[in-house]
Amino acid sequence: MTPRPESSGSHPEQPAEQRRTEPPTAARKKAVAKKAAVKKPAAASPAAKAVAKKATATKATAAPVKKATAGKAAGKKTAARKPATKKTTAKKTGATDAVLQQAPPPGSAAAQPGPPEMEIAVSPAVDAADRERLLSGTHHAPHSVLGAHPVPGGVAFRVFKPYALAVTVVSGGLTVELHDDGDGFFSGLLPLREVPTYRLLVTYEGTVLETEDAYRFLPTLGELDLHLIGEGRHEELWTVLGAHPMTHQGVTGTRFSVWAPNARGVRVAGTFNFWDGTGHPMRSLGATGVWELFVPGIGEGELYKFEITRPDGSRTMRADPMARRTEVPPATSSVVTSSHYEWGDAEWLERRAGVPAHRAPFSVYEVHLPSWRPGLSYRQLAEQLPAYVKDLGFTHVELMPVAEHPFGGSWGYQVTGFYAPTARLGTPDDFRYLVDRLHQAGIGVLMDWVPAHFPRDDWALAEFDGRPLYEHEDPLRAAHPDWGTLEFDFGRREVRNFLVANAVYWCEEFHIDGLRVDAVASMLYLDYSREPGQWTPNEHGGRENLDAVAFLQEMNATVYRRVPGVVTIAEESTAWDGVTRATHHKGPSGFGGLGFGLKWNMGWMHDSLQYMGHDPIHRRYHHHEMTFSMVYAYSENYVLPISHDEVVHGKRSLVSKMPGDWWQQRANLRAYLGFMWAHPGKQLLFMGQEFAQGAEWSEAHGPDWWLLDPHYGAEADHRGVRDLVRDLNTVYGHTPALWQRDTEPDGFRWVTGDAAEDNVLAFLRYDGDGSPLLAVSHFAPVVRHEYRIGVPDDVPAWHEVLNTDAGRYGGSDVTHPDPVKPEPQGWHGYPASVRLTLPPLATVWLRPA
């Protein structure tokens, strides 16, 4: 007779259905027709030996089963003792007993009875050390203890259900009540050869719940996923970390997983366990620092957090860094979610990759969603925003950060939920609906993305697992000097992975067409806003943050590789070389390019607004502020931004920056917008500025829409500016000379850039076929008659296509209704010239007639 070795049993975490190799016999099916109830013997008593021996012999001969035992052991006591007086009952129904079906057929080697000493039953109770670690939340491998495990003498069942009054194992037609070991632990020993498929009946005061045992399941993360996480190269990180409703081993539930390498233990708490994570410890998946638990029977809508035991033994309750949905702030819980949205923008996605952004029309309307029309949800915005933006002719909207943030006054720039659209306006699928409707209206969607820093809230990322994790371990490198936040540790591969995957996530899961990356300058320089002694040079002795450079390069390369047609845009306010240069092309500084598609031209914004703020009589002394941008216009692929930052915090609204009375302010604004739309580069205008709102923007009430109420006396003044913006976008979109060669020096030629005494700027823009547009800006409040402008001699006549002084915009209506013919008199270095009447404070565009 060959004894059954202890290792011949199933793997403790292998499902029974994967281990079943022998079919049930007729004798075994007949055996399930009988039932019996017996007292449970102590683990190592002579009675236990006899029962174990008898059970083995009975199964080997396929005789009717008469007894099912469940060993009882309380607390830490594991020594042999007398059988308990409490009975464990094995009940049978008419169904086939799944436990008994798994026994080997008579005559097989595994069915032969072994020596008595090999069948001595052991105590099924959790030992003292494991018990203490489970109670204190510091167990790394709860699945190795809890659940069902083959042991000498049968299968030990161990269950940890705090507050339960009783726990019963149900397998097929067999039910066995486990012994109450105290402190929520229950155990029992059944004389089975293999771990069966089973469920648990858990009795609480006033109710009985039937559930799967969370500790009978294999890990839900595969070796490849864990390898990629460990390497910091999992480009779809959101698919493996966080909370995911799924079917695992044929059972529906939710997989929870979190990266917390410094934690002594992690438990998941939520509405499904009354926010007590004691009974839901997670297992550590090796050196990756990932903890995982599949919780059967729960799904979408459940709230949860991770209860982390820090290295010092203290505990902290944390929101999920990978949560794809959150509670509405100020509540901070994460929400289990899945997307059920069916997209309707396939045509848009296919078309958007046809032409790169820097060679396409690209005019952007910047929006703060919560305040654009206060009180509207994502779905309500989807009924109004696309129509409004389409009517004004913008090609894109740029959404200020939509990722979850705790403080509305941060406008979204202090993010705590990097993977969750803010719940203030609806669900993630509601946000998808808004993006989809914008795409169906032919409007691209850009999103502000904030990978530079995060707030210090003690329920979010700061010292997430008890030590610096997402932030740099050096306090000088971690603390952001301007905003009281923490900077990401871009040198840690898992942190880079978290952010790179996040960029991909928004583009792939929400069909975002572009990411405008906030505060790039603060990432690139170690001494950003820091005094001497507050920063440490890099390994070369320089001030460049080499880790941040590598991160930005990796992010851009990954996004452009994975998502065709997407553009990344840098808000970078310094002269860093190569922001929009390809990552594999090195520049004079020795660095490869950062790989962005576009960059905000902060220099143009600052200089041009400063010029416009001067009284016209003084502008002659500041003429260079309007021309200097052309010195570096082709060093990067630029966006000309008039963003939210320029119309808040005492900076005044765009029209209020302009000098003069109300008429002159509006005229200056219109002339400036005409100059901006004609200047090389893409355009961005913040909401409210398109209709000359006089007040600064406030996130509390948004744009002053009442200015466009027909009953308001000055409504025509504001409507006129909005009509101009619409016409600027319309003519712009139909004039390739204004966008096709934005990044090519040959697409621009000065006509006159030095007419400072006249406050006049004139230049030509050319499309790919050489067709020109003539733009003339006059920033003085007088009419200049017969003003001569040099032009090429190959255009027989010029036709005025836009004049910001037109009466319908609120101007004085000094226009050129008839074609203007060149004269053979050379001027401004050109062989011909035209004589124009320049309107006061106006920009005029002319195209070949």
Image (cartoon, grey):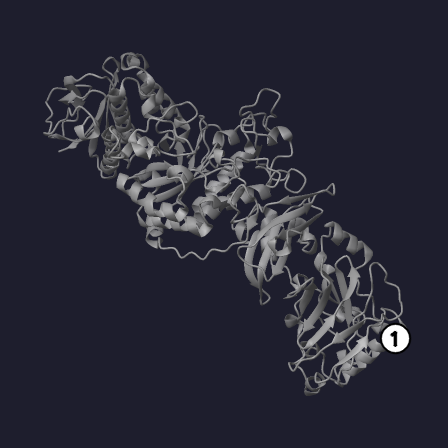
The mark tally for this picture is 1
The answer to whether one can see residue 355 in this image is no
Residue appearing at x 76%, y 60% in the figure: 185
Q: Position of residue 820 (x, y in %)?
A: 11, 27
Side of 728 where 88 appears, left or right: right
Residue 404 in picture, x, y percent from top left: 50, 42
Badge 1, how many Cα within 10 Å: few under 14, some, many 20+? Answer: some
Image quadrant occupied by the C terminus: top left
Residue beneath the point at 34% across and 32% down: 704
Q: Is residue 780 left or right of residue 638?
A: left
Q: Quadrant of residue 603?
A: top left
User: Residue 621 appears at what percent x and percent y?
Assistant: 31, 12
Amino acid type, label 1: Ala
Outermost residue on the front side: it is 206
Front residue of 817/829: it is: 817
User: Which residue does the image show at 64% across and 53% down from the upper left?
Assistant: 274
Q: Is 697 drawn above or below residue 67 in the view shown? A: above
Picture layout, residue 439 above or below residue 407:
below
Which quadrant of the figure has residue 570? top left
Corner quadrant of residue 398: top left
- List the residue tagged with mark 1: 47
Residue 626 % position (x, y)? 31, 21
Q: Is 562 drawn above or below residue 649 in the view shown?
A: below
Q: Secondary structure at mark 1?
A: helix
Which quarter of the figure is the N terminus placed in? bottom right
Horizontal relation, residue 261 to residue 844: left or right:
right
Residue 105 visible, this angle: yes
